[in-house]
Image (cartoon, rainbow, N blue to C red):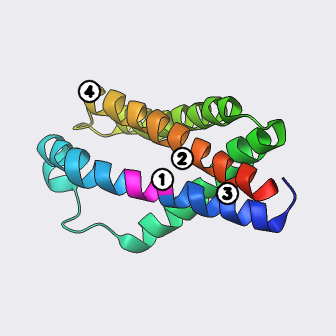
Amino acid sequence: MDNARAIGQAFMATLVVFVVMDAAWLTLVALKMFQSQLGTILRPEPMLGAAVVFYLIYTFGLVALAVRPAVAAQSLAVAATKGAVLGLTAYATFDLTNLAVIKVWTIELAAIDIAWGVVVSTIASMAGCAAGLRATT
């Protein structure tokens, strides 16, 4: 996938799907879970600049490591597999490190968040792949 238009469309689709799904997850499910388990260590309001930077960097990783190879292979299955592996790796790094060093981080919280990372990364990668494939035809 060397076409700049295809890469741009794949990036935007991946970003939009990831952000929309993650925002829904955070507001509808995770916030209450984080508040009940982490309490006062949470910021009263999220640092939006840090969130924007995370979403851009993570989307770049999904596109580089999952979407582009999947478009080259013309395979949503490749996007799903590579997206899931990246989600597992990234979210496990975050959650298991927190579990190791933060007293109030729980195994339950880590397991749920890792599972979420796999799901959202898989779906966002597939969306990016679909957009990239449409742009190359």
Q: What residue span does the magenta drawing correspond to?
A: 17-21
Amino acid type assigned to the residue bearing label 2 in the image: Ala
In this orientation, which residue lies closer to the viewer: 77 or 90? 77
Which secondary structure is most common in the magenta stretch?
helix
**Residue 109, placed above or below residue 121:** above
In the displayed orientation, state which residue is furthest to the right: 2
Which residue type does callout 3 highlight? Ala
Quick one: 32 or 119, which is closer to the camera? 119
Q: Which amino acid does label 1 sit on?
A: Phe
The residue mark sitting in front, 4 or 2, is 2
Identify the residue under disc 3: 10
Which dot marks residue 18?
1
Instruction: Count up the numbered dots.
Output: 4
Residues marked 3 and 2 touching at CB (< 8 Å):
no
Provide the secondary structure element on which disc 4 rests: helix
Q: Mark 1 and 3 residues: CB-CB less than 8 Å, in contact? A: no
Location of mark 4 (residue): 108
Residue on which disc 2 sits:
124
Query: What's the mark number on residue 90?
Result: none
Q: Is residue 30 magenta?
A: no
Q: How crowded is mark 1: few (under 14 residues within 10 Å), some or many (20 or more)?
A: many
